[in-house]
Amino acid sequence: MAATRTTQQPPHGSQKSKTRQRQTPIRPPEQADVKGNITSLLRDKGALTRGEITVKTGIPRTTVYDTLMNLLIAGVVEKYVERNGRRGRPSVYYQLVA
């Protein structure tokens, strides 16, 4: 003779809810907003590195890099390298084309 196992379900109202509240996703910045922010920053401050742009705008570094590459291709900005006489990578600055 086989034993059967039965489980009792708690009443419908007393069962704990296991649903998680979803956090609202952060809206990615629009490309036009990012381009405008970067170009206005370069207009106001002059030549800056990618790291300086990232810190001053709060835009993620990969987005800054991609946007700067698009602006380079479009001919809106230009980049130049400044060696400081020390070892390591030189600083790469971006500035608006006059």
Image (spheres, rainbow, N blue to C red):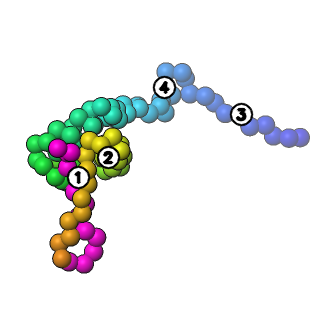
The residue at the point 14 percent across, 42 percent down is: 43
Range of residues picked out in magenta: 86-98
User: Marks 3 and 2: which is nearer the front?
Assistant: 2
**2 and 4 marks in contact (CB < 8 Å):** no
Is the residue marked by circle 1 packed among few (<14), some (14-19), or many (20+) residues within 10 Å? some
Distance, label 3 to label 2, CA atoms, is: 70 Å
| Quadrant of residue 79 within the rendered picture | bottom left
Using the numbered discs, state the Cα–Cα distance from disc 2 to disc 4 in whole angstroms. Answer: 62 Å
* Mark 3 vs mark 4, CA separation in Å: 19 Å
Residue farthest along the front direction in this orientation: 98
Q: Which residue shows up at 10% across the image and 42% down it?
A: 44
Q: Position of residue 80 (x, y in %)?
A: 24, 59
Q: Amino acid at mark 4?
A: Ser
Q: Earlier in the sequence, mark 2 or mark 4?
A: 4
Front residue of 31 and 80: 80
Mark 1 highlights which residue? 94
Distance between the Cα atoms at labels 1 and 2?
Answer: 9 Å
Contact check, label 1 and label 2, Cβ < 8 Å:
yes
| Quadrant containing the N terminus in the rendered view | top right
Q: Which residue is mark 2?
A: 72
Residue 33 in percent (x, y) is at 27, 32
**What type is the residue that disc 3 sits on?**
Thr
Q: Residue at x 27, y 74 (%)?
A: 88
Residue underneath mark 4: 14
Q: CA separation, marks 4 and 1? A: 62 Å
> Which tag, 3 or 1, sits closer to the chain's start?
3
Query: Is residue 64 rendered magenta in the image?
Result: no
